[in-house]
Image (tube, grey):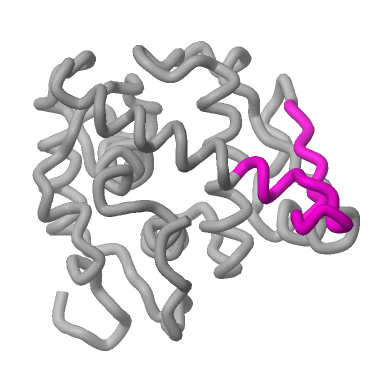
Amino acid sequence: MGRPLPAIDFTMVVACPDRGRQIAEAYEAAPVFEPSAIPVYKAFIRETVRQFQLLTRPTWRGGLGVAVVLSWRDPHAKAATMLDELRERRRLRIYMTAACGNPHPYLADHENDMFRAVHDAFGHAATGSDFGPDGEEAAWLAHSYLYSPLARRALTTETRGQQAALIYGNQQGFPPPQKLCLLPAAFSELTNVTFRGAAR
């Protein structure tokens, strides 16, 4: 399931506005349904399912024993409450796709929900990252290490792409439509990230 998480201080990861605007522009220009992206998304789904199984499998069977609960409302205004609940109760509540009014053109709702769960667990919770621009960038980077290079292209669309469109795009503050598309490969490169103190 990807490569081991490297010794990175994820608190030092920062969002780069210039890169963010480039990603937002690419996401907004991409079609809603790009057939050539289907093989990438098939790999992404397979790998997401394996991560979800690890997350929810009982500890006595080698899993993490987390109970994932679907919510009709956004259950966490702050990442800290999600982290506390996950740590103290082994429970992860996620805002279910069916309640968002923004369906994915390719992923089934349950597949999208599985992805939301593993991204919150292995992206945000694993690094202590919040839901702000820097936290989302750190969560993308951390979660990227659990995907193959192929599937990481879809992960980048689903996280970096959508977040950039939300923060830097033409409809700032409004969730962009979900898409089956691939951004330029450079945006999926693990070295294409900025750390605090480095030139932006």
Which sits in the foreground, 165 or 184? 184
Which sits in the foreground, 121 or 128? 121
Q: Is residue 137 above or below residue 107?
A: below
Q: Is residue 171 visible?
A: yes
x and y percentages locating residue 118 in the rendered image: 58, 46
Tell me the quarter of the picture where residue 18 sits: bottom left
Q: Is residue 42 above or below residue 124?
A: above
Q: Is residue 165 left or right of residue 93?
A: left
Q: Is residue 164 visible?
A: no
x and y percentages locating residue 17 in the rendered image: 20, 58
Residue plotted at (70% across, 60% down): 80
Tell me the quarter of the picture where residue 70 sits: top right
Residue plotted at (45% across, 13% down): 103
132 in magenta: no
Which sits in the foreground, 6 or 27? 6
Residue plotted at (77% across, 46% down): 57
Number of numbered discs visible in the structure rendering: 0
Q: Return the residue found at the far front.
A: 61
- Residue range in magenta is 52-70
Q: Is residue 96 above or below residue 21?
A: above
x and y percentages locating residue 163 in the rendered image: 35, 42
Q: Quadrant of the C terminus?
A: bottom left
Residue plotted at (19% across, 61% down): 189
Which sits in the foreground, 22 or 144? 144
69 in magenta: yes
x and y percentages locating residue 136 in the rendered image: 43, 55
Tell me the quarter of the picture where residue 140 sits: bottom left
